[in-house]
Image (cartoon, coloured by chain):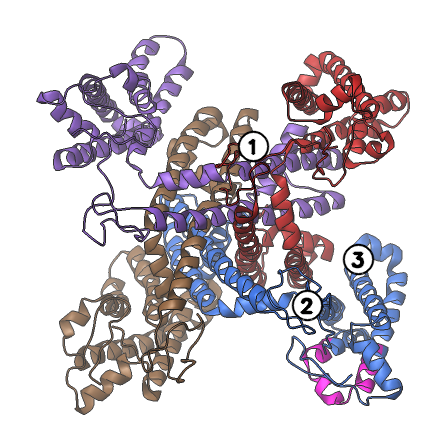
Chain colours: A brown, B blue, C red, D purple
Amino acid sequence: MSEQPRSSSGSTLAPASNHGWRARWFHIIFGHGDAPGRLFDLVLMVAILSSILVAVLDTVEDLHARMGHLFLMLEWVFTIAFTVEYVARLLVVSQPRRYAFSFYGIVDLVAVLPTYLTLLAAGGPHLMVVRALRILRVFRVLKLTRYVGEADMLWATFLRARPKIFVFFSTILTLVLIFGALMYLIEGPENGYTSIPRSMYWAVVTMTTVGFGDITPHTALGQMVTSVIMLLGYSIIAVPTGIFAAELATGIRQARQQQACAQCQLQGHQADARYCRGCGASLHADEYEG
Amino acid sequence: MSEQPRSSSGSTLAPASNHGWRARWFHIIFGHGDAPGRLFDLVLMVAILSSILVAVLDTVEDLHARMGHLFLMLEWVFTIAFTVEYVARLLVVSQPRRYAFSFYGIVDLVAVLPTYLTLLAAGGPHLMVVRALRILRVFRVLKLTRYVGEADMLWATFLRARPKIFVFFSTILTLVLIFGALMYLIEGPENGYTSIPRSMYWAVVTMTTVGFGDITPHTALGQMVTSVIMLLGYSIIAVPTGIFAAELATGIRQARQQQACAQCQLQGHQADARYCRGCGASLHADEYEG
Amino acid sequence: MSEQPRSSSGSTLAPASNHGWRARWFHIIFGHGDAPGRLFDLVLMVAILSSILVAVLDTVEDLHARMGHLFLMLEWVFTIAFTVEYVARLLVVSQPRRYAFSFYGIVDLVAVLPTYLTLLAAGGPHLMVVRALRILRVFRVLKLTRYVGEADMLWATFLRARPKIFVFFSTILTLVLIFGALMYLIEGPENGYTSIPRSMYWAVVTMTTVGFGDITPHTALGQMVTSVIMLLGYSIIAVPTGIFAAELATGIRQARQQQACAQCQLQGHQADARYCRGCGASLHADEYEG
Amino acid sequence: MSEQPRSSSGSTLAPASNHGWRARWFHIIFGHGDAPGRLFDLVLMVAILSSILVAVLDTVEDLHARMGHLFLMLEWVFTIAFTVEYVARLLVVSQPRRYAFSFYGIVDLVAVLPTYLTLLAAGGPHLMVVRALRILRVFRVLKLTRYVGEADMLWATFLRARPKIFVFFSTILTLVLIFGALMYLIEGPENGYTSIPRSMYWAVVTMTTVGFGDITPHTALGQMVTSVIMLLGYSIIAVPTGIFAAELATGIRQARQQQACAQCQLQGHQADARYCRGCGASLHADEYEG
């Protein structure tokens, strides 16, 4: 296959050679188009999700006591499998260094490294390090981001709305700072507002309408100011929502008008169309993502 | 009546015969178009709501002590009534098997089964089973979904936006996993984050801005990370809202332009129009839903 | 003035006579167009807000102890003033009975009645009745709804979206019922879910993302189900927001295209325009609202 | 430079003279267009953020004990720097009085005043005043609002939607008043609803879906009314969001169609365009803001 569409992360990877086992494995490992490629994807996804499940359940004391040995064994099975996958990716790609330093290359390395490092740290005195390494395993979830194709349009909308989102967050943070300082002054340490940083944490809890209730205003004035903060937080959420809805509506309309079928060039497909209504060709080209 | 419009659940049901009592009762039980059909619907709705009310109030200890016998009697009245309704539906429809295995057929069966099963379980030792059977009665509310016609457009919008919603939930769950693991590491079991699953439960509580306050961060670093989680959860809600608003706006515009009057074929009716502005015919056809 | 535009509440009120003091006072009391009418409105608004403030502050124990006598005196001043206003409205209007039974007529009566009734109830043994009568005074706030002209478009949007909103609330209540029953079964009375009604109250607290934290799940299964409820509540809010945004966008576009200047018939004014861009005439006609 | 575009705060400032050091410094201090102007902006921003950080961290007892002296020294460095900046702004502008009474002039003065006032208050008995003066320093964050150019469109949208927002807040406050009074009546002081103001504070906490949990309903009737309040608050948020989304969508569409390149007058640029697609000229003119 000569055409190499750019992946969503911007990098274009090519097979090490166009023929032989490396070309075939390249299509199986990096491609999502044919049956073997899809089977590889499926097996990988199941392995990733299972390895995360093991890492998560291993922190439950009960389960660790009963099935800790099984979890450890499974963890090594997954680690070795992901190591084989990582090495295979390095082997079949034409520019291994480029893959290794791409986003997915780093994610694939970080997915296996912690388990090997626990061997080194295990003998040492730093229990915290072992614990941190164990928890790093859940970051394997990032390996899955490869498979989320639809994210591109949402990401483009986010980028287009970026300046407005920046204004929104600046406003939120300014309000958090000012109201945090104000409440620190009004309520004071005796009511739990022991410092401005803690008071700002409370302001975020309140503005975002989370409202844990671990710190609450006790004075009448504090409750009045809190009411203002809550109403602000409650209604200011309309701003990013409105921005996003407006930008996305524009994006959807444009996408519907612009997308052309790769085969017959027909335009004006519906947003959820998977095949060209004119010639029946797939509207989703076979994609190779790093 | 020869035309049998497809119901919203996709199944088309026909009367067992086109004449005689079975045809007449078919229109009363399955149709919503004429007076007897509407009366049947009304009586059924009242019975469903009443039976749910009885099931709900029966769990209040005070009321159970005072009116338990009345509740039990009413429960049997409703069960027998729904059993008669279920048998009648089976009798008047041309393909009883098809109805029995349709969504509404199963719902109608499940609405009466638990009460009969309590007779079997009552003598047994499993109090939990009896309690579960009693609570299953509230699922009778699903019998009401027959009458929610407007849901179709919202459902269509949901289906159209499905790939974007999938991306949204994947993002949320990834963030919940990563932040849950992170907070487990930062705060640790001594602050209530006893395992990653529990920490993930807390992350959902926080990201969705529910904020029960049963678990809260105590360290300064934990409070900083929590602030980030809350701001993410607070603003990320803009995404599905924007998606839904944008898709729905498109849907409303299309629906307004496309719907044609069944009698005079006039198009371009307003979204809330019930009758054709050209000839006055009803824009809602008589629908038979299983 | 011969033209009597329909008020937002649908009732058209006419002065008792077209000349003399009753006609003049009709325009002062019911009209918002000229200087005396606006002065009357302003004085009335200040009186309403002040009387509410007195009723509210009177429930604060400290303030009641210190200024109870002043509050009582002020309360009688406001009551007499509103009584005079009510009688005056009855006198200047052509159909007093019609006004008396209109929404605003009832609100105006209810605004003064409680204070007189406290005189009757004061001697009696029912302290609760006196307290209720005192609190009823805050309903005077409804007298202010007269002055919220912009509400019409929002109300029209609400009416247009009504069938969808009904579907939305039906869905919410069905989910609340099912999840309430489920959590009652899973967590049980020992964890605070003492009955299905209480469990449903908790489900509303959770689905609406309020999250008081007075009842929280303690079992692992309960926390998993709760996570699902929270994610549902968090994302389902997108539905009414999307509906409203989509309907409102349509409404704004239509309103901009359709509104014509009463003087020169020019169309296509901006949504916030107060005067015709062609001839400078006011786009808001003098309105008489009951 | 002869053209002086109006700043977003509506005031146009001119240099004291068109040549010499005052003109040059005017462009450095007030302009954002050339390299020295941008460097000045950057240094100022860093100084503002650092001074806020010092003010915030100084309230943390631990840090104050360990680094109080350093914080005090830094505070004086920043104060002197901002004083020099303020004096410089007064010197280079043609109408110092006009700058001094503009929004930014007052903000710049308030940014330095508290530190000098602490010298006066330090000897006095009023510890509260010293604390208040120290906390006032965080208001320096308002100096940063100069640099948020994108806010203009959001502000314009807010202004256009103002009448609808007013209606929204009136509705919210009316509901808060009525439900606050109702819950005070239903639950009463024995359940924490000690007065209507406190009950209204709780109603705001509940309607905005914050839900601290410091006050919660205990009676069955109170929990039912609370469920209504929560569902209202949960769904009413759709109103401002819908308003904002609808107005913003209109604003974005208009802005895209209307903006013309200052050099070649080409219209129809994309919302995020920084340079004219026809001639490459910057679409953002060099702006002088107070």
Q: CA distance from mark 3 to mark 2?
A: 29 Å
Q: What's the amino acid at mark 3? A: Leu
Q: Is residue D270 above or below residue D199?
A: below
> Where does the magenta region start and end?
B85-107
Q: Is residue C21 left or right of residue C141?
A: right
Q: Residues within 10 Å of mark 2 (few under 14, many from 20)?
A: some
Q: Are marks 2 and 1 on the same chain?
A: no
User: Does dot 3 land on a helix, a strand or a loop?
Assistant: helix
Q: What's the amino acid at mark 2? A: Gly
As for residue B255 lying within the magenta part, the answer is no
Q: CA distance from mark 1 to mark 3?
A: 58 Å
Name the spot of residue C101 as percent of width and height, x first: 84, 35
Letter of the chain that mark 3 sits on in the rendering: B
Between circles 2 and 1, the one closer to the viewer is 1
Letter of the chain that mark 2 sits on in the rendering: B
- Residue sitting at the far front: C264
